[in-house]
Image (spheres, grey):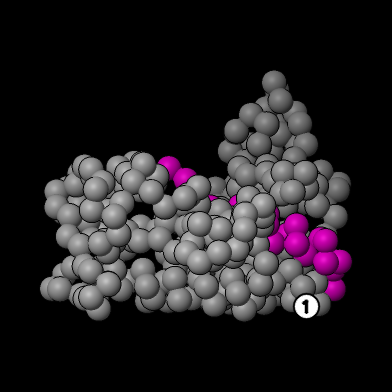
Amino acid sequence: MDTFSGAQFRDDNAAREYLERLLWPFGPVCPHCGVVDHAYATKRPGVYRCAEKECRKDFTVTMRTVMERSKIALHKWLQAFHLMCSSKKGMSAHQLHRTLGVTYEAAWFMAHRIRAAMTAGGLSPLGSGGGIVEADETFFGHIPGTKRRQGVGHKMALMTLVERGGNLRSFKINRANRVEVERVINANVSKEARLMTDSASYYRRGKFNVASHEKVNHEIAEWSRGDAHTNTLESYYSVFKRGMKGTYQHCREKHLHRYAAEFDFRYNTRIALGIADGERAALAVKGAAGKRLTYRGTH
């Protein structure tokens, strides 16, 4: 994969050429009709015209991506992708604003667009072939309109599934109860999987379409019993919470799924899998294709 080398961080032409190599490995792709490598360059830098008789429309490499119609310099977009992908606990909009020399509002919007590029889709069930899948949830922040009290009823809830040695995916849930937990697990975990959870009541009473279900009881300080544990998710949540509290500090409930997608992406492209910062950023840029996020859509 054509990873980040540095030149594309300083010059818009180098940034555009990098994007064209990355997103168009077989030649320009017309976003209007889908034809590949049947277009020619116009006099305007970076603008191509489809050579198909029925189309003949102009397009650029950023069309139908999260960078479409942006007035921010293209090389600054690539800097932002690299910064957010290489920072383990995230990169705040304030830090992007200071580093890139753009307004805070622009940096905030860029960050949400990049999170959209990091969002995965069309995922296959976890644990296929008898793999081990851990399920757990975490709570943090405060839901507006609820009274602060003991317990977690006033906090935002996030549920996460991870296949041991594989990928992870998180879901913003309304509340941690049997109905929500069953819905997430049965929709995302293979029937062949071995499910590992703690002994919360919704896991004890839940009906899950899996091969087996083992539980550990944290209330009696049982953290593992053979293969049965949720330690993978405990480690992930440690990084997630440090990032959310230390880097981002504030998160509105309706944006929680965007931040979760960011941390999921970095975990699923972690260095332990042999993916370096440059390749991780390139994967995020490739994920930008076919996605749009309007300013109104982020509020």
Query: In the visual, does 38 lie left or right of 212?
Result: right
194 lies left or right of 239: left
Q: Is-magenta flag for residue 11?
A: no
How far across and down, in percent of the image, does residue 71 sit?
85, 55
Q: Is residue 50 left or right of residue 265?
A: right
Rendered view: 79 above or below 74: below
- Magenta region, residue range: 101-122
Majority SS type along the magenta span: helix
Neighbour class for label 1 at 10 Å: few (<14), some, many (≥20)?
some
User: Could you tell me which residue is drawn at 47 percent across and 50 percent down?
Assistant: 175
* Magenta-colored stretch includes residue 117: yes
Residue picked out by circle 1: 99
In which image quadrant can residue 285 be found? bottom right
Q: Tell me where residue 173 appears, x and y as whole percent.
A: 48, 49
Q: Nearer the viewer, residue 259 or 291?
A: 259
Residue 186 percent coordinates (x, y): 30, 42
Residue type pointed to by label 1:
Thr
Kindly identify the residue that appears in the image at 55 percent across and 53 percent down.
257
